[in-house]
Amino acid sequence: MAEAAVNIKELEKNQEWWRAAELKRSKRLDYLRKAVWKKGAVGGLYAPGIKVDMERAGLFTDGYFANLNDPGMVRHAKAVANVLDNITIFITDQAQLVGYVGSLPHTISWLIEGGALLNEEVYNEPGIAPEPEAESLKKIAAMMDRWNGHTVQDKFIPYVLSFAAEEGVKLLSGAVGWGLPLSISGYNGKDYEYILTGKRGFEDIIEDIDRRQNDMTEKARKKAGPEYLHVGLRMMNWEGMKIVLQAVIRYANRYARLAKIVAENYETNPKCREELLRIAETCERVPAKPQRNLQESLQFDHFLQVVERFESGGGAWPSRPDYYHGPWYDKDVNIDKRLTKEEALDLVGEFMIRAHEVGAFFPRWTREGLQGITGTWVWTLGGVKQDGTDACNDMTIAMLQAARLVRVSNPTFAFRWHPQVKDEVMRECFECIRQGLGYPSMRNDPVLITNAMHWHGHPIEEARTWVHQACMSPCPTTKNGFQPMRMASATANMAKVVEYALFNGYDKVVNMQMGPQTGDARNFKSFDELYNAWAEQLKWLMNLLTMSVNFGRAMSPEMCPRSFLSAISERSVESGLDAVSPEGDRGNSWITAFTWVENIDSLAAVKKLVFDDKKYTMDQLITALDTNWEGYEEMRLDFVKNAPKWGNDDDYVDDIMLKCLREAAQFSKVIKDPSGNNWPILPENVSGNIHYANIVRALPNGRRLGDALYDGGISPGPGLDKKGPTAVLKSCGKINHITDGRAFLLNQRLSPTQLSGEKGYQLWRSYMHTWADLGLDHIQFNVIDDATLRSAQREPEKYQEVIVRVAGYSAHFVDISRKTQDNIIQRTVQGIA
Amino acid sequence: MPLCKECKKFFPVKEDPNKGDCVQRVVDPRQAYYKAKPVGANMDASSCSSFEKI
Ligand code: SF4
């Protein structure tokens, strides 16, 4: 023991946090952490041993086709119920929480009903079909045949072609948009205020629905009127909700039964037996009835997440664990003293591991965009309660401590900072950052609450419940505030805007006229002409994407009903409508703006070197860009080095940033989402900067086709922020983080040496004061030195738990492509003055 | 013909003994666990490689 303590100290002194964590965590957590099969794709490929889950696909297929003549929501609910009733379940040794989105620990889920595009990839992906492979491939092919003409894609495409064939082709080119605009891809928020506060269990909801069905039947029979025109649809939707709720209760009971069987027939260790019986008791209780303690609360939540992923892609994981589980933590640890802090930490750590192990089969373009992880699962901590008081609690601290022990890359945390946050909590956040997790990212709560009210008109109490719907965008967790699908399928590859402005809307990568013809840029005589072309291309792109998402949203209840999501959403339980229906949704849409800053640096470079200094003509520039700068290296370097760059507190370029953002903000109020609400932009990147490297052509900021794009929403280009971290903050502080957009991602790399000890904390605190004073809404840090990252590139097996912040998410460094690794190493390490 | 109900891994449901769970221990390269799958008591077990006579 003493030796281990010395060893831990030594490792911490050397800042080898990942090795220290292995020694510090309990034996149980160490076992459970190492038990996880890696589900994120590495370089676009799944790890050896990972297999697609054939059971979910087969059971859903059988359930769907056995009920083909049922109305949509009922058919969907029966298909999900067939999965929940029959899929293989398992309980891992030493686990205290159960539930997995697949039949076995090494499987990844497959939404076969999505479409042939995905299913073809499953069939063709080497090594992903379970052994014996030939037999599995035969089954996959047979299932695909069965689905032919019935998938969401099959149903959706004729509608798209009916009115926007050209736009559909442009979207499918992959050059400008990212994501599927349908609710099957998940990313939905949840009405946690309804389902996770301990006020109700599923039995209560079923009773409520029964009452509503009786009530509506009675009223509709008595009096004819327009309010009852859709009574049949509502009755059937309610029926679907009840079917799925009952199935989830049975699913939980299956775990209870397995735990009992193992406890009574196999387990010989009395402590393990006791734990299994507690699992049984927990799963008999939740989600049928409201939770009574921390284990039940975490288990309730985990069942919600797992079942949601049996019905949709679940690409994001909006969650606020400290807020919703904190009261149970407090009850068990502080009041009833039923759990010690260490026991609670084991549960909390396992809660993260249970999420970390979830995986899904994604098409290749998604895998490349989400390197090393299985979704952008950013859990929200901290913030304020609905009455405006500090919401941090002991569970906040436990989550941050557990994160340092289990060191998972997904989920990650984002912390809602506000002026009342206690120093004790800030220190815990800092420890996570200092220990190189790359999270929590820090969010400015007062700014983002005001921003939510400004853009979407959320009442203040509603705005204060916000969680991260995906990586960055805040979304409330209330009846009318939560968002039921990924409206961010309006995800734009924004660097194309400046490219199209320079090339008359023509895309030479996909060889198509994409944007409007805004004129031959060789003939532009002023910066204003170029800017106007840019603005026109911007509006075209924003409209193209939002139009497609609006359309997808409207079609979703028919194409891919969400019986489970509806059943746990107050507004659907009340109305009998699919949760994705815009009725009752205040609207909380945003356009994710990938590769945004390239526009600013490019426009600034043209303004300076062509129109102000007249060093080059537009004709020369377009020729150089058209040849990918080949033969123009000296000129390219001039555009890199001698044109002003964003992030250096230089008004010349910073003013262009503001002008562009305000252009977008104005148009955000012109285009409307299905609830009639606004579509502000949100610059961030996931790892789109790598994904789009071969899609965006040469630009006036000096990039060449194939070069990685900048790494984050408003982060300066790597190595281009020459004036230090305060200048970066000052540039970013010129943006109005309330009215100029929905949120703005900023990556910073800080030196681990500088952040060591108490002095390091104080430096960071004062840096954070500046950040808050300047009104920035987001910042995230990588605190790891180049030497460690280079060593991890050489000997990946020794650095399995080294984590880096990629963009809006973190990943284990060894699980991302070499190009992304190099891109992270290139980011400027800022010394805080 | 051997049936699932004659197998050690079969655990009948109290309310309906015709139904039950096949419970098996698995040790994979990363973890050990127990798994369960619904089976019928009278299901043909002749081609089941995991069958263990009670
Ligand atoms: S499926 Fe095989 S192992 Fe399972 S209960 Fe039946 S015979 Fe036994």
Image (spheres, rainbow, N blue to C red):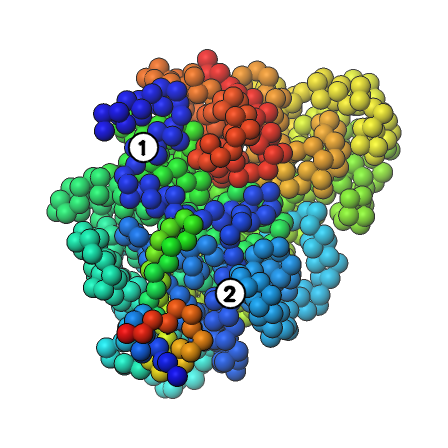
Task: Give the residue at x 23% y 58%.
Answer: A267
In the image, residue A168 lies at what x, y percent? 70, 58
Query: Which mark is drawn over residue A54?
Result: 2
Query: Chain letter of disc 2?
Result: A
Pointer 1 and pointer 2 on the same chain: yes
Q: Which residue is mark 1?
A: A23
In the image, residue A106 lies at what x, y percent? 46, 54
Query: Chain letter of disc 1?
Result: A
Task: Give the residue at x 77% y 48%.
Answer: A510
The residue closer to the viewer here, A2 or A170, is: A2
Q: Is residue A813 visible?
A: no
Up-down relation of residue A338 to residue A57 (above or below): above
Quadrant of the rendered structure where residue A155 is? Answer: bottom right
The residue closer to the viewer here, A585 or B42, is: B42
Distance in Å between CA atoms under marks 1 and 2:
37 Å
The numbered mark, 1 or 2, whose residue comes first in the sequence reads 1
In the image, residue A382 lies at what x, y percent? 33, 38
- Judged from this view, the residue extending furthest toward the left is A336
Amino acid tagged 1: Leu
Q: Is residue A692 visible?
A: yes
The residue closer to the viewer here, A563 or A480, is: A563
Up-down relation of residue B43 to residue A357 (above or below): below
Task: Give the residue at x 23% y 64%.
Answer: A265
In the image, residue A366 lies at what x, y percent? 59, 49
The residue closer to the viewer here, A600 or A258, is: A258
Indicate left or right for A246 with A526 as reference: left
Image quadrant for the N terminus of chain A? top left
Q: Residues within 10 Å of mark 1 (few under 14, many from 20)?
A: some
Query: Which mark is drawn over residue A104?
Result: none
Amino acid tagged 2: Met
